[in-house]
Amino acid sequence: MTDLLNIDEFRGIFLKYTKKAYEMLPKINKPYILDIGCGSGLPTLELVKLSNGTIVGIDINQDALDKLQKKIERMGLSGRIKIMNISLYNTNFQDENFDILWEEGVLHILDINKSLKECSRILKPKGFLVSFETIKWMDKSLEMFPNYGFELIDHFLLPEKYWWTEYYAPLEERIKELHQKYKGSKELEILKSHEREIAMVKKDPKEFDCGYYIMQKIK
Ligand SMILES: C[S@@+](CC[C@H](N)C(=O)[O-])C[C@H]1O[C@@H](n2cnc3c(N)ncnc32)[C@H](O)[C@@H]1O
């Protein structure tokens, strides 16, 4: 979808929380980090800033990966970030490969058992899995993590209705401005699809309240 709205700019306001979560981990020198479902790479590029390690980003959306690849080249980060079009379900990474697994908004769309099994396999003993998910999803999924050797060691919640106040409300304003500009053109459909998403969130913004959850592989 054309990025008419410059979604990255809105999504970028969440990176202060990526930073906060990263800083809650013990210091690891040159960590090997996997960003699961990296998309166009906002968390990936933040992780490269926060650590002195190497990041592998995986996703199954080639358009998003192409966008990220361009950013990596433009920023001269090819030596520190590798991206791959593979699913978390079939990564082929070696066992106990990574120090940190990072995922922002991905696990809830996947099969939790298959995902956690693979996460546990590719993470080093005592390694960390950091998840950014809705509180609602995590509340019902949390009991699954110990089945795969993970223990919740820390977490924090974003301020209530954060998605609405910081992301969707300003996005709605931007859409209103663009309606006039794109009147009668095919781009209007893109604006409408975002409006449908906004209507869903507006109905019940608390449903989208979320947090960062830090798990450690203890078994
Ligand atoms: C909500 S987006 C989050 C993107 C990015 N983490 C961020 O926070 O901006 C979810 C991402 O998960 C990716 N995804 C979906 N299924 C996947 C799978 N089986 N393996 C890896 N990534 C997957 C999607 O293509 C999408 O880019």
Image (spheres, rainbow, N blue to C red):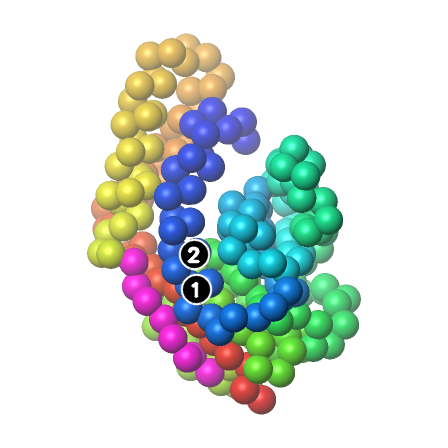
Report the disc number at residue 23. 1
Q: Cα distance, mark 2 to mark 1?
A: 6 Å
**Height in image: 189 above or below 41?**
above
- Location of residue 202 (image quadrant): top left
Looking at the picture, which amino acid does disc 2 mark?
A: Lys
**Height in image: 57 above or below 93?**
above
Q: Is residue 105 left or right of residue 91?
A: left
Looking at the picture, which amino acid does disc 1 mark?
A: Glu
CB-based contact (under 8 Å), mark 2 and mark 1: yes
Residue that label 2 marks: 19
Of helix, strand and loop, which mostly describes the magenta segment? Answer: strand
Other residues around mark 2 within 10 Å, as few (<14) / some (14–19) / many (≥20): some
Q: Which residues are magenta?
A: 151-158
Q: Secondary structure at mark 1?
A: helix
In this view, which residue lies farthest toward the bottom? 219
- Residue 167: percent from the left, percent from the top? 32, 41
Answer yes or no: is residue 144 visible: no
Which residue occupies the foreground of this view, 58 or 73? 73
Other residues around mark 1 within 10 Å, as few (<14) / some (14–19) / many (≥20): few
Q: Is residue 216 magenta?
A: no
Q: Which residue is at a point 43% across and 27% down the rendered structure image?
A: 5
Q: Which residue is at a point 54% across and 51% down the rendered structure image?
A: 49
Answer yes or no: is residue 48 visible: yes
